[in-house]
Amino acid sequence: RTYHSHQDTLDDIHLSACWITLSRLSKQGAERKWLRAHQWALGPLVQHTMSAAKKGEIGGRQLANIAYGAAQAFATLGQLDEAVFAALARAARQQVSKFSAQGLANTAWAFATADQPDALLFAALARAAERRLGEFNAQNLANTAWALAAADRPHGLLFVALARMAKPRLGDFNVQNLESTSWAFATVEHKDGQLFTALAREAEQRVGDFTTQGLANTA
């Protein structure tokens, strides 16, 4: 409703805020139920986003936020608009050098979550991530590894670098980060004995915090 009231004056910052807010609302009971029953109401926001992306009117930070919010919203609602992700992918490929470390990780996570493994985008994200890994925190490292594995875009050199950065910092990883990282490296069959030993040691120390499924994914 807020979008419809102000759509003629929205810029990329407002579009980003709309998608992030929508992702949060989609996780709340009553709002999720309404959105699922009125998915047509998203049409104008989707079209506005696609148009802005095609015209190059969305900045790097906002592209990352929009992709992240859209992926979460569509995943929760059980609906996906592939066209909006195609438009965002084309725009992101042109802006990837302007993404922050978190923006790179969130964008990779978003496209993997939406099952939109755009090859050119993931290649661009991987190249940018290799140059910026020193800026990645534990969540960024785990999300990037998970996204590349889930999208079947392993980029071997980046996994070598991710392993190197992750090993001395596993103490900063939460349980989900440990699970995602273990799953990612196993999925792409990246054989780094030191990393897997360190992951197993860290998981053992926090075994009580894992769910049964989480332990299975980490094993």
Image (cartoon, helix red, strand yellow):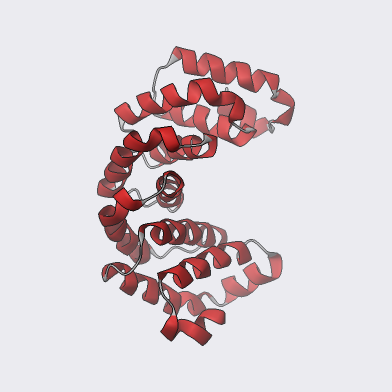
The residue sitting at 43% across, 79% down in the picture is 44
Report the quarter where the C terminus lies.
Answer: top right
Question: Which of 164 and 150 lies nearest the eye of the viewer?
Answer: 164
132 or 77: nearer the eye? 132
- Up-down: is 130 above or below 75? above
Query: Residue 83: percent from the left, percent from the top?
Result: 33, 66
Q: Position of residue 216 (x, y in %)?
A: 60, 27
Q: Is residue 50 visible?
A: yes
Q: Is 102 above or below relative to 132? A: below
Q: Residue furthest right?
A: 208
Find residue 141 and report its horizontal and vertical position in percent.
Answer: 47, 35
Q: Give the camera-side residue of 36 and 167.
A: 167
Seen at 63% across and 32% down, the residue is 175
**Above or below, 139 relative to 120:** above
Residue 158 rendering spot, x and y as whole percentages: 34, 30
| Snapshot quadrant of residue 178 | top right
Asked if residue 185 lies left or right of residue 120, the reply is right
Residue drawn at x 32%, y 44% as measured from the top left:
125
The tally of labels here is 0
Res. 216 in view:
no
